[in-house]
Image (cartoon, rainbow, N blue to C red):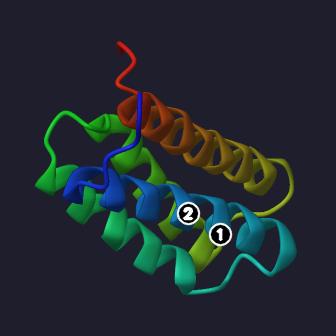
Amino acid sequence: MYFRFTLFNSLTLLVMAASAAMIWIRLRFSVEKTWPLGYYAILIAYSEAFPGSLSPYAVFGGVVCGLLLRFEFMGGAVLQSVRVIEMGIFGYVLVRGTQLLLMLPW
């Protein structure tokens, strides 16, 4: 079995690399950075280009978490819980991308 570089596989790898970069950015830098909003634009475009690849609920949840963190409406335990939810969504994108690349069942 070999890996074929199709457009779908290449874009899936790009989204997975962007997800790994966002995990690093969220853990390393402050939560007010604008980069994650660009990531979510890429994620929305990917999920619209390939319907059924990602759950729309997870994508929407990630966008909401990204906006809440960007405009910082809360603090303390609520802020930490939103960050944990966002990390879960990053993990979902990485796991789902691996499933799509390896053609594993949903």
Q: Position of residue 41 (x, y in %)?
A: 32, 72
- SS class of the residue under badge 2? helix
Residue 14, above or below 9: below
Name the residue beneath numbered marker 2: 17
- SS class of the residue under badge 1? helix
Amino acid tagged 1: Ala
Label 1 crowding class (10 Å Cα cut-off): few <14, some 14-19, many 20+? some
Residue 25, above or below 82: below
Residue 91, above or below 105: below
Residue 83, above or below 2: below
Q: Position of residue 76 (x, y in %)?
A: 86, 57
| Mark nearer the viewer, 1 or 2 | 2
Residue at coordinates 49% horizontally, 43% vertically from top-left?
93
Image quarter of residue 38 = bottom left
User: Is residue 9 or residue 1 the one in the foreground?
Assistant: 1
Image quarter of residue 28 = bottom right
User: Is residue 79 or residue 94 the one in the foreground?
Assistant: 94
Residue at coordinates 31% horizontally, 38% vertically from top-left?
54
Report the residue that reaches farthest toward the front: 1
Name the residue beneath numbered marker 1: 21
Q: Position of residue 36 (x, y in %)?
A: 53, 74
Amino acid tagged 2: Ala
- Disc ID at residue 77: none
Image quarter in which the C terminus is found: top left
